[in-house]
């Protein structure tokens, strides 16, 4: 079975990390995630991240580096996370989300993250703290 990568973006700006609240499907709605989505065949993972963040948030971003680790999402899907920086635009919840929040390193526990996103969020928080 081919495994498809879902890429989440740890988008950091001015010392804060962007959290996005899912609006669908019903079993995930209300939980928070690192915004992103599935890489298409023929697309690299960082290319997919740039496209997904453009579609979902209306921003231009630059992927920086992969946060080590790989988190299974169910049959045939695995989550990778890349750090990214904002190049232009103000994120807006255009697709898939109903609220966005910029969280400082001491605020990361204030939202209910999807379980599979938590290790990468913790690592992104450490990186924010360390500058
Ligand atoms: O966003 P989309 O519906 O394409 O995501 C596909 C799957 O990846 C969903 O099951 C979602 O729960 C998961 N996902 C995740 N963490 C993210 C982004 C997506 O677990 N940061």
Image (cartoon, helix red, strand yellow):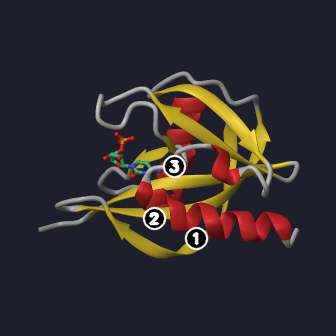
In-front residue for pair 122/5:
122
Label 2 CA crowd tier, 10 Å (few <14, some 14–19, many 20+): many
**Mark 3 secondary-structure assignment:** loop
> Mark 2 or mark 1: which comes first in sequence?
1
> Mark 1 or mark 3: which comes first in sequence?
1
Label 1 CA crowd tier, 10 Å (few <14, some 14–19, many 20+): some
Nearer the observer, disc 1 or disc 3?
A: 3
Q: Residue at x 45, y 65 (%)?
A: 80
Cβ–Cβ under 8 Å for marks 2 and 1: yes
Side of 59 relative to 94 (left or right): right
- Determine whether 69 is above or below 99 in the image: below
Q: CA distance from mark 1 to mark 3?
A: 19 Å
Q: CA distance from mark 2 to mark 3?
A: 15 Å
Question: Residue 47 location, x and y as percent?
Answer: 51, 53
| Residue, disc 2 | 80
In-front residue for pair 48/112:
112
**Mark 2 secondary-structure assignment:** strand
In-front residue for pair 49/19:
19
Disc 3: residue Cβ within 8 A of ligand 1's nearest atom:
no
Q: Which mark is residue 14?
A: none
**Quarter of the image where the C terminus is located:** bottom right
Side of 27 relative to 23 (left or right): left
Question: Residue 125 location, x and y as percent?
Answer: 72, 63
Residue 11 can be seen in this image: yes
Q: CA distance from mark 2 to mark 1?
A: 7 Å
Label 3 CA crowd tier, 10 Å (few <14, some 14–19, many 20+): some
| Residue, disc 3 | 113
Residue furthest front as drawn: 110
| Residue, disc 1 | 66
Nearer the observer, disc 2 or disc 3?
A: 3
């Amino acid at each position: 079975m081919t495994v498809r990568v879902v890429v989440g973006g740890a988008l950091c700006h001015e010392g804060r990390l962007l959290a996005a609240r899912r609006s669908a499907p019903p079993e995930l709605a209300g939980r928070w995630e690192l915004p992103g989505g599935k890489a298409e065949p023929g697309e690299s993972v960082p290319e997919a991240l740039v496209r997904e963040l453009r579609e979902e948030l209306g921003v231009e971003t630059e992927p920086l580096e992969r946060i080590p680790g790989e988190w299974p999402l169910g049959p045939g899907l695995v989550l990778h996370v890349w750090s990214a920086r904002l190049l232009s635009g103000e994120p807006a919840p255009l697709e898939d989300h109903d609220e966005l929040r910029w969280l400082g390193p001491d605020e990361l526990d204030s939202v209910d993250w999807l379980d599979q996103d938590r290790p990468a969020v913790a690592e992104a928080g450490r990186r924010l703290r360390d500058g």
